[in-house]
Image: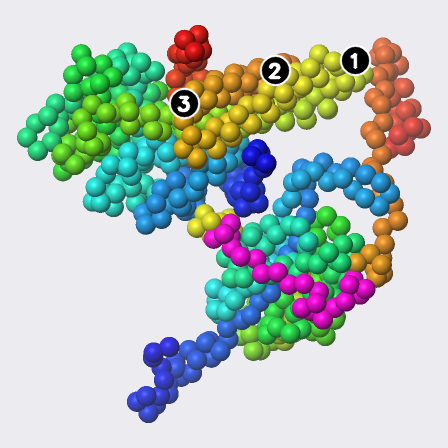
Amino acid sequence: MALDFGFAEEQEFFRQTVRDAVNRLIMPRAQELDEKEEFPWDLWKEFAALGYLGLRHKEKYGGMETDTITQMIFYEELARGSCGFAMSAIMQILMGTYFIARFGNEDIKQRILVPAIKGEKIGTICFTEDQSGSDLGGTRTLATKVDGGWRINGRKQWITNGPIADFATVMATIDPKLGLKGLNFYLVERKTENRDGFVPGQRLHKLGSRCSVTGELVFDNVFVPDENFLGEEIGKGVQYAGEILNEVRVMTGMNALAIAKNAMDDAREFANNRIAFGNPISKYQLIREKFAKFWAWYEASRTYLYKCAWMIQNNIPCIHDCMLAKYHSTEMCMYAVEEAMRIYGGNAFCTEYPPQRYWRDAKFLLYGGGTHEVLCDYLGRIYLKD
Amino acid sequence: MGFGHSKFGFVSDFDIRISDLLEAKMDIFVLVKQVPDPEAIVKVKSDTELDIENKYFTSFFDEIGVEAGLKLKEKFGGKVTVLTVDNRRVDALRRGISMGADEAIQITDPALEGSDQFTIARVLASYLKEKPCDLILAGRQAMDDDAGIVGPAVAELLGIPHVNAVVGLDVEDPKKEVKVTREVENGKEVLSCTLPALFTCQKGLNTPRIPQVMNVMKAMKAQIKKVDLAALGLSPAEVGLSSAKVKVQKYLPPPKRPPVKVIKEDFPDNVKTLVKLLKEEAKVI
């Protein structure tokens, strides 16, 4: 009896509760959020008041300390509502606050983490630059040791929540020549009259995931004190990043599940009602095949993703599994959104119907946690070596 | 309370009001039921059995009842207990806790399988008659069988007043008459009665709150208190299918959608044919 694929009754209850909150707060506004392309402050406040931003943090800071599977259930349900909103919220819950909770001193936790869990301060994490992203070794943002702290110089791009962020966990190198071995994380706050900090640069207008605001952050000789160095040892940044990469990849897969299911559920409704040549188009074999393929790949993806969540929760090494599951689920999602567009026919080309939104949102998932080209190159290499 | 008592030899009006309020604490029970999600696929399995997809949620009107109970608790203090008769599902109870209820009771017993609404009401009344209780709230009907029997039947069995489908609930003092509002054709009626009473709740009474995650976590871990028939002094012979006053004879699936008819004639003959079909076949004009 070692295999058990069931969710606990409590987890089912949690899913139902999150689903209900998403159905009531986010679903009715999904199209509006996409069209406006603005950060929805009203929704953010309403959502933060429910307490979900503390999902994975310690109770003493206002968090819930849930297990990994419960967190993944949350991500899957949240992304059903709006991919953009999910991205902003998950940035806050996971990547934007992880290293602060892990390495920040008590003062930093009280000053940054506690208000972040309440949704009063917005956080982000900065990896990507104009010449580096999946290739972290190419990071050029420079951290120079000075008396009592560090000076940060550089520009970060593609920063989710960047234009509205109050604080950022920034990956910077002590020497670009050191490659992956020179990288560290630093806590940098937004510049104010009394405090040195980053300045938001250009905001990017995106194809999908549009209500999460994304942009550039500029670090112009920013001084941060020693306690803002987030780590125990210099040069271990990549190792630390690895601690959440599994979670980030499975989380991305959960988003893919949600978007794919939304797309194909809507497509099913459409196919059952759209009449062509005297029949609903769902009566035609070529249309049915699309659903069958989707169903098979979706179930496989979902099972694999939850297996990965279970492995993370039980501290079983699973870096390759998480890469494979992220790759598989996101490609499955690409198939689903593409086929939903075809099932809707010409209607899919109108912004009035949702498939185009799913199609645009899905593309966002291709890049986070490693592009599929980088993942596949690596995975292929590993498989052949084995 | 540490203030307002006659330690210094006087009792002000203010003191009396405070103590009145303290005595006004309300014991509120809310009857809840887990029903199939409207999205769940329901198929007829046999004449008397349904095959229901495993998607359930708390009946919407029951959530309105929980919200109404919580609002009164916030005003007067006291306790809200959610109560269900169900052998399998306790999600409706957890939902109640996640919204803010204090306690959850599951009445469960294998003998209850197949019970009709009146039996369920008898079971609930057997539990409630022993409890200190100021108010019982329920949904106006469950969203699966739409029977609307259990609430009023519980009130009848307990011999307390009941008002159905309330959209307004005005309690100024639980010790005095309370006012409830119902919707009637072209207007509203306002009724009054004393507590304890049972009200079934209708859409419009309030908007059920979205639970905060703190309470959700509490609900996930909550111990659900189980009560069986023996504890209620009921025998298995008094419940279940054999004692049901109403039995399901047959489930019938809805009729299948008729095939589409394509009129292939050219204009204006196609219009004439369409009108003829609408008149003679569809009989809609």
Q: Amino acid at mark 1?
A: Phe
Q: Nearer the viewer, residue B104 or B263?
A: B104
Upstream in sequence: badge 3 or badge 1: 1
Upstream in sequence: badge 2 or badge 3: 3
Label 2 – label 3 distance at C-alpha: 30 Å
Vertical placement of B133 versus B165: above or below?
below
Quarter of the image with the C terminus of chain A is: top left
Task: Give residue A172's position: percent from left, percent from top.
Answer: 21, 22
Badge 3: chain ID: A
Q: Residue at x 63, y 46 (%)?
A: B57
Task: Identify the residue position indicated by label 2 in the image.
Answer: A339
- Range covered by the magenta-colored residues: B218-239
Marks 3 and 1: CB-CB under 8 Å? no
- Neighbour tally class for label 2: few under 14, some 14-19, many 20 plus, Cα within 10 Å: many
Quarter of the image with the N terminus of chain A is: top right
- On whether residue B103 falls in the magenta region, the answer is no
Q: Secondary structure at mark 2?
A: helix
Task: Identify the residue position indicated by label 1 in the image.
Answer: A277
Task: Identify the residue position indicated by label 3 in the image.
Answer: A319
Q: Quadrant of residue B141?
A: bottom right
Q: Secondary structure at mark 3?
A: helix
Q: Is residue A164 at least partly visible in the picture?
A: no
Q: Amino acid at mark 2?
A: Glu
Q: Amino acid at mark 3?
A: Ile
Vertical placement of A223 versus B194: above or below?
above
Are callouts 3 and 1 both on one chain?
A: yes
